[in-house]
Amino acid sequence: MRGCVRSDGCVDMVVMRDNSRWEVLNVFLNVDSGGHVEHKACEYFKARAFRLEPHAAASSKKGSYFACDGEMLARGPGATAGATAKKMPLAYAPVDVTVRQGMGRVFCSHRVGHSHQLGAFAV
């Protein structure tokens, strides 16, 4: 990704606002090549901290929710509980996020020739 450095103490953010489903699909089809960063529907920036503030989805009958990596973390007013009404790990309230440089280590495999090697880097 443009300007993306794993250990710079920043989170690289790509934000999309109010786009059609086709536009969102078009952006996601460009993620592997990094083309989504330059897409006209996206805004790219770096941040050391940010705040997520939930709001009720006025156009949705299902309500709104917080999710991270596909896992529902909090449900807002009007959001359906689904088949199981389990307790959510977060309150449906503003969430402050701060990047702590050097506090983590990411392990990943990468391809070298015809084999995969495990690597680690600090973030």
Image: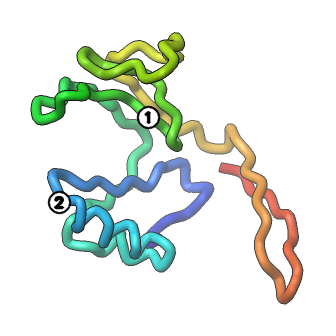
**Distance of label 2 from label 1 (alpha carbons):** 20 Å
The spot of residue 15 in percent (x, y) is 29, 53
Looking at the image, is 46 positioned above or below residue 66?
below
Question: In the rendered structure, which amino acid carries the disc numbered 2?
Answer: Ser
* Disc 2 crowd, CA 10 A, few/some/many (<14, 14-19, 20+): few
The spot of residue 58 in percent (x, y) is 11, 30
Which numbered marker is on residue 20? Answer: 2
Task: Name the residue at 78% across, 54% down.
Answer: 107
- Image side of residue 57 versus residue 122, left or right: left
Task: Name the residue at 36% across, 71% down.
Answer: 36
Relative depth, front residue between 59 and 4: 59
As drawn, the residue found furthest toward the left would be: 58
**Local SS, label 2:** loop
Which numbered marker is on residue 102? Answer: none
Question: In the rendered structure, which amino acid carries the disc numbered 1?
Answer: Ala
The spot of residue 50 in percent (x, y) is 36, 36
- Disc tally is 2
Residue 63: image quadrant is: top left
The spot of residue 4 in percent (x, y) is 50, 65
Looking at the image, is 62 positioned above or below residue 22?
above
- Image side of residue 99 versus residue 103, left or right: left
Looking at the image, is 110 positioned above or below residue 71?
below
Mark 2–mark 1 CB contact (< 8 Å): no
- Image side of residue 22 versus residue 118, left or right: left
Looking at the image, is 81 positioned above or below residue 8?
above
First of labels 2, 1 by sequence position: 2
- Image side of residue 107 versus residue 15, left or right: right
Task: Name the residue at 19% across, 52% down.
Answer: 17
**Local SS, label 1:** strand
Residue 48: image quadrant is: top left
Q: Give the residue pinned by disc 1.
A: 67
* Disc 1 crowd, CA 10 A, few/some/many (<14, 14-19, 20+): few
